[in-house]
Image: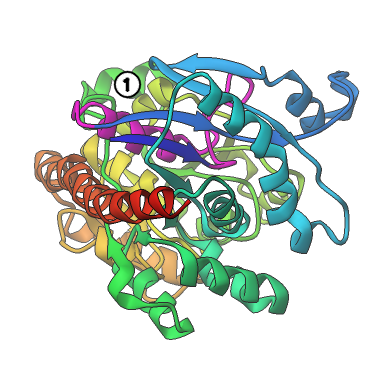
Amino acid sequence: MKLLTFSTLFPNTVKPSHGIFVETRLRYLLGSGKVESKVVAPVPWFPSSNPRFGDYAGFAKVPRRETRYEIDVRHPRYLVIPKVGMTAAPWLLAQSAKKEIGRILDEGYDFDAIDAHYFYPDGVAAVMLGKYFNKPVVITARGTDINLIPQYALPKKQLMWAGEHAAGMITVCNALRDEMVGLGMPGERIVPLRNGVDLQRFAPMDRQAARAKLGIDGFTLVSVGLLDQRKAHHLTIGALPLMPDTTLLIAGTGPERKNLENQARQLGVAERVSFLGSVAQPQLKEYYNAADAMVLASSREGWANVLLESMACGTPVVASNVWGTPEVVAAPEAGVLMPERTPEGIARALRTLRENYPDHAATRRYAENFSWDATTEGQIQLFSRIIGAARPAASRQRAAA
């Protein structure tokens, strides 16, 4: 089978961790030997790579084409329009990709289906492209595209249109499937295929050696994710006054960093909070191994990969009881779900974890149930069925013409 993977959520040389979960799933799918894929991963157009423009300059530095893990990745540019950009984004995204996809076809890669990730705007754009190139489309819903975007009237209408015309849909957890069915999408075309974890990349190591290398002492938490309101690092910092023997390491970048630093100072816990900035996955493994627990206080999560990454290193988690997270943290050896998303709720959950702290080896064994094998096989079955159904229809169309 030949796929065209389409998403703005895909790593590049400038942002190697951006959408890495999309790349990882694709890598395991290609590893089956039953699938080929080329990737079209549009990035916003920006006129200058001058560092004074901050993150925007990074878009200009992304190469037009690159190879990652032997995967051909194209990065066409699409226009982002302030204020009205949200509703226009699917059309702009589709227009930006047409020429690039046309070139791919001209080069001889006649793909069978479009594999789109993130429902809005990417999935909507992919269905537009599918109609233009006469290819079936499968869209993977991942979280905020379903539990946030439908709050906006026009994007919801576009999202529902895409769901109606997609040949198939994948969700990363059962909770997202239930939400999509509740919105009115056809449940018979929605398949839950949860993310796995790279058990080779994230694995146990000598914990004392990791702590010594990183200079960690005492009960230590690690929190990983974008520094924004949704990830709610402020709740974890707010719990520290209730846990005077605890240190917090925060890995990630984002707009809330200054506010979080100010909060830590105001609460008198600044000396117990370290902001690590962006941490690459090889180093992230060391932090997972060195920490006593990983904390994720998000308000919304489809399927939080960081939870499984921590567990794969043998480190249990404390997480908010939202969306797909109860499907990830489903046993005592995995960790504890917060009774409520408050500093007090985090502190209580951590006390519960410490009173019944699981064996690190048991936490690792739990994570081993989440390999990519089942997800890969589920994708192969879904794409085989959809492509098989599309080929006779395409043959009839050619005969009629």
Q: Tell me the quarter of the picture where residue 361 sits.
A: top left
The structure residue drawn at horizontal position 41% and vertical position 66%, both measured from the top left corner, is: 320
Residue 75: x %, y % from top left:
63, 27
Q: Is residue 323 visible?
A: yes
Tell me if residue 239 is in the magenta stretch.
no
Residue 375: x %, y % from top left:
22, 47
Q: Which residue is mark 1?
A: 210
Along the horizontal axis of the image, is 199 left or right of 212?
left
Residue 292: x %, y % from top left:
31, 42
Tell me if residue 29 is in the magenta stretch.
yes
Q: Is the image coloured rainbow, by chain, by secondary structure, or in one colour? A: rainbow
Residue 87 drawn above or below residue 67: below
Q: Tell me the quarter of the picture where residue 52 sits.
A: top right
Q: Main secondary structure of the magenta part?
A: loop
Residue range corresponding to the magenta coloring: 7-34
Along the horizontal axis of the image, is 279 left or right of 110?
right
Q: Secondary structure at mark 1?
A: helix
* Front position in the image: 228 or 343: 228
The structure residue drawn at horizontal position 26% and vertical position 44%, both measured from the top left corner, is: 196
Residue type at mark 1: give it: Ala
* Farthest front residue in view: 400
